[in-house]
Image (tube, rainbow, N blue to C red):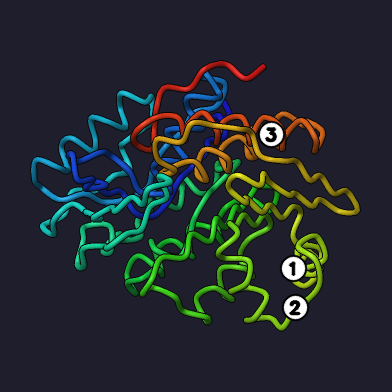
């Protein structure tokens, strides 16, 4: 019997350390939890990462399980489970300070990951998970070994000081779907000497890297998605923002689900904006998802 295709978040698993306490996070983990919540069991979802042999590691695994995410590919390491100190401004927007030498930096390749990659329908990865040579090699190999039909989503997720132009280029060349936010667009535009409107820059990126789809989130200003000759530009949804952590990851998850379902571009963008707005209304990155039918 053929094994069912899976949806994968690969990279960092960590805890967001807010002033009022710790909340589970990490962009690939947020993506996986959001996708599992949205898909309601229609696709199996797993995280490929590593946590420490510590209390935060145990709690991270438990949080993934509670979100119906497979954890058999989350390794246990002697290094500490990742942490990031989160600061929120008066509008709920976050800034981050990441701990170094975290467990997910040492994610190693294995035969089981090779088998998992071979049956992957969607993989989502970013730059932060590749800050260390060990995890970078594993993530790139995993993405490369997914089927040619797989959605390879590069959710760029730039986090200072981990900005590496060569790393971004390598990741762009691996991907067939790109998602970025309004702060990351100028970085890519400068890096590849692109100019014009947002839509024009997205179309140039699509052409330069042979991407199936490029998505830009703009916070309160909504989102812009380009796919082939199609362009969908939607305004923001008025939202009482608690914090924005995880909103972009949830947006990416809904885009991935919409692509798997074969939805039209307007529907994908509308639902993705709704999901991101919902996450902004809650504290933490992975609130329980309602139905978006």
Q: Is residue 186 depicted above or below 50 in this figure?
A: below
Q: Is residue 58 left or right of residue 170?
A: left
Figure quadrant of residue 245: top left
Residue on which disc 1 sits? 205
Query: How many residues crowd mark 1 within 10 Å: few (<14), some (14–19), many (20+)?
Result: many
* Residue under label 2: 194
Residue 103 coordinates in the image, percent (x, y): 21, 57
Q: Nearer the viewer, residue 223 or 265?
A: 223
Tag of residue 260: 3
Towards the viewer: 134 or 210: 210
The residue under the point 41% across, 22% down is: 288
For marks 2 and 3, give the CA distance: 30 Å
Position of residue 164 measured from the top left corner of the image (x, y, whole percent) = 46, 79
Q: Residues within 10 Å of mark 2 (few under 14, many from 20)?
A: some
The residue at the point 38 percent across, 71 percent down is: 160
Does label 1 or label 3 sit earlier along the sequence?
Answer: 1
């Amino acid at each position: 019997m053929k094994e069912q295709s899976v949806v994968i978040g690969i990279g960092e698993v960590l805890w967001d350390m807010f002033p009022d306490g710790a909340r589970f996070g990490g962009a690939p983990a947020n993506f996986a939890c959001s996708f599992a919540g949205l898909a309601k069991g229609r696709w199996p979802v797993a995280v490929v990462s590593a946590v420490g042999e510590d209390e935060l590691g145990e709690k991270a695994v438990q949080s993934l399980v509670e979100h119906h995410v497979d954890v058999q590919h989350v390794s246990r390491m002697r290094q500490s489970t990742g942490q990031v100190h989160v600061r929120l401004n008066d509008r709920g927007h976050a800034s981050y300070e990441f701990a170094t030498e975290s467990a997910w930096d040492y994610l190693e390749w294995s035969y089981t990951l090779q088998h998992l990659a071979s049956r992957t329908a969607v993989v989502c990865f970013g730059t932060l998970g590749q800050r260390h040579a060990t995890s970078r090699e594993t993530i790139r190999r995993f993405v490369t070994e997914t089927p040619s039909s797989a959605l390879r989503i590069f959710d760029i997720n730039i986090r200072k000081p981990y900005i590496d132009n060569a790393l971004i280029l390598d990741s762009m060349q691996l991907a067939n779907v790109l998602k970025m936010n309004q702060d990351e667009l100028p970085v890519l535009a400068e890096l590849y000497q692109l100019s014009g409107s947002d839509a024009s820059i997205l179309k140039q990126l699509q052409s330069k890297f042979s991407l199936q789809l490029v998505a830009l989130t703009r916070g309160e200003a909504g989102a812009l998605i380009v796919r082939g000759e199609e362009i969908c530009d939607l305004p923001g949804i008025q939202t009482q923002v608690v914090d924005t952590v995880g909103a972009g990851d949830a947006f990416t998850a809904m885009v991935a689900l919409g692509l798997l379902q074969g939805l039209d571009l307007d529907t994908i963008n509308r639902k993705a904006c709704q999901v991101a707005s919902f996450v902004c209304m809650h504290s933490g990155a992975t609130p329980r998802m309602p139905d978006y039918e």
